[in-house]
Image (tube, rainbow, N blue to C red):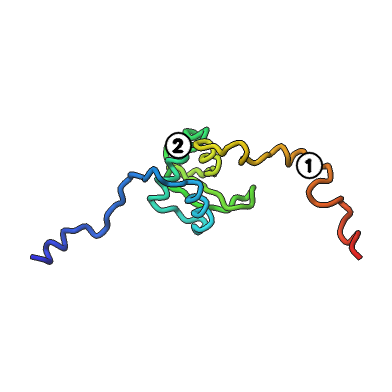
């Protein structure tokens, strides 16, 4: 009888689709981005978290999601030369997205903590950043 009862217990239990609201997606996603192996589908839980983040935080969520997201992966982005989140749609098309932009849209940083992009633009071409352009070896004795 004990064997009969044990054989009726499912071997694998599906996780519930409910996600705790207490998650800090900017921290969890950033750790996941650097820790998860490249080109490998994320697990079901991470899939749910990233899909919700995309739906609530991306300005063009409907366009990104299309007819549905089949999987999420971490891949090396050829343009930005860094690890990025990619989604694979049901039709097998692939697109990247920034979890940081999604989080910032949901919960923007206070103005005094935001990166000032225009400061970097102002320094371009005006000798800012890497010395005075004297070239390698000049000035060193």
The residue identified by callout 2 is 55
Q: State the separation of the CA atoms marked 1 and 2.
A: 36 Å
Q: Nearer the viewer, mark 1 or mark 2?
A: 1
| Quarter that holds the N terminus | bottom left
Q: Residues within 10 Å of mark 2 (few under 14, many from 20)?
A: some
Name the residue: 12% across, 61% down: 5
Query: Residue 20, percent across and down?
Result: 37, 45
User: Which numbered disc, 1 or 2, marks the residue that appears first in the sequence?
Assistant: 2
Query: Residue 44, percent across and down?
Result: 38, 50
- Toward the front, the furthest residue is 112
Name the residue: 84% across, 45% down: 127
Label 2 SS: helix
Asked whether disc 1 touches disc 2, contact meaning CB atoms under 8 Å apart, the reply is: no
Left/right placement of residue 17 relative to residue 37 reads: left
Name the residue: 91% across, 65% down: 141
Query: Residue 30, percent across and down?
Result: 52, 51
Left/right placement of residue 128 relative to residue 27 reads: right
Reply above or below: 85 against 65: below
Left/right placement of residue 76 relative to residue 66 reads: right
Give whichever of 93, 7 is nearer the camera: 7
The disc placed on residue 56 is none
Q: Residues within 10 Å of mark 1 (few under 14, many from 20)?
A: few
Left/right placement of residue 70 relative to residue 130 reads: left
Query: Residue 57, percent across and down?
Result: 49, 37
Name the residue: 45% across, 45% down: 50
Give whichever of 78, 116 is nearer the camera: 116
The residue identified by callout 1 is 123
- Toward the left, the furthest residue is 1
Label 1 SS: helix
């Amino acid at each position: 009888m004990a064997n009969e009862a044990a054989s009726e217990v499912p071997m694998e239990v599906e996780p519930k689709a409910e996600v705790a609201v207490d998650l800090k997606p900017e921290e969890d996603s950033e750790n996941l981005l650097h820790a998860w192996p490249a080109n490998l589908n994320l697990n079901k839980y991470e899939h749910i978290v990233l899909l919700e983040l995309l739906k609530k935080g991306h300005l063009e969520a409907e366009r990104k999601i299309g007819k549905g997201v089949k999987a999420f992966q971490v891949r090396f982005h050829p343009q930005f030369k860094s690890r990025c989140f990619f989604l694979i749609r049901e039709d097998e098309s692939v697109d990247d997205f920034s979890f940081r932009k999604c989080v910032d849209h949901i919960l923007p940083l206070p103005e005094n903590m935001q990166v000032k992009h225009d400061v970097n633009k102002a320094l371009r071409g005006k000798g800012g950043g890497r010395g005075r352009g004297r070239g390698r070896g000049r000035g060193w004795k």
